[in-house]
Image: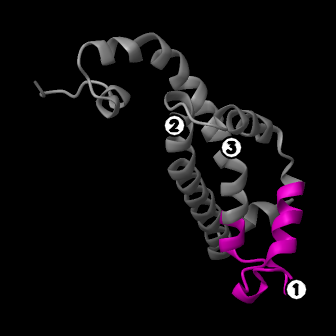
Amino acid sequence: MGDVWAAFGTAEFAHIVGLSLTVSLSATAIAAVIGLPSGAALAICRFPGRRLLILLANAFLGLPPVVVGLALYLMLSRSGPLGALALLFTPSAMIIAQALLAAPIITALTHRAIQDPWEEYGGALRVDGATRSRARTGPRAGSA
């Protein structure tokens, strides 16, 4: 047990924690860049296939991490279609895997958070003269 406590003060431990934080924060940022606009578009815009995309976003909430890991392994292995990139077992591959797991979660939660207020206030914004793009973002402070 003493060996475990001794490891906390080492440079290797600090490197491991730093790498873990870098991977997780990077993956979350990438997933947010993908998921926030996607969820907002699913809540606001009407287009063919929208219901299918909402269904897929909600279905991927339960996507097993093992399935994502296996699919990514097959894609990034030497004989896979992305094998030439040599990303297998790298921090980049970990970021891709975590972003693939987080993007549907962010998309579905954003959709749910925006859908009800949009249904309630979106029409009022349009009636009051807001353009469709303006109604999506809402009123801005300091604008006439």
Q: Earlier in the sequence, mark 2 or mark 3?
A: 2
Q: Quadrant of residue 80?
A: bottom right
Q: Secondary structure at mark 2?
A: helix
Q: How dense is the environment of label 2, judged by Cα within 10 Å: few (below 14), some, or many (20 and up)?
A: some
Which of discs 1 and 2 lies nearer the camera? The answer is 2
Q: Give, as a three-letter code, the residue at label 3.
A: Pro
Q: Give the camera-side residue of 1 and 21.
A: 21
Q: Give the camera-side residue of 64 and 138.
A: 138
What x and y, as percent, mark residue 133?
33, 34
Identify the mark at residue 41; answer none if there is no mark.
Answer: 2
Q: Quadrant of the C terminus?
A: top left
Q: Secondary structure at mark 3?
A: helix
Task: Look at mark 1 in the image and give the residue it sits on.
Answer: 79
Q: Are marks 1 and 3 in contact (CB under 8 Å)?
A: no
Q: Quadrant of residue 128?
A: top left
What x and y, as percent, mark residue 110?
56, 32
Task: Look at mark 3 in the image and give the residue it sits on.
Answer: 104
Q: Quadrant of residue 53?
A: top right
What are the residue bounds of the magenta stretch? 67-95
Q: Give, as a three-letter code, the residue at label 2.
A: Ala
Q: Are marks 1 and 2 in contact (CB under 8 Å)?
A: no
Q: Give, as a three-letter code, the residue at label 1.
A: Ser
Question: Considering only vertical position in the picture, is 40 above or below 23?
Answer: above
In this picture, residue 67 sits left or right of residue 116: right
Question: Considering only vertical position in the picture, is 105 above or below 11?
Answer: above
Question: Considering only vertical position in the picture, is 78 above or below 139?
Answer: below
In this picture, residue 6 sits left or right of residue 124: right
Work out how far the residue at label 2 is from the one at label 3, CA to CA, in angstroms.
14 Å
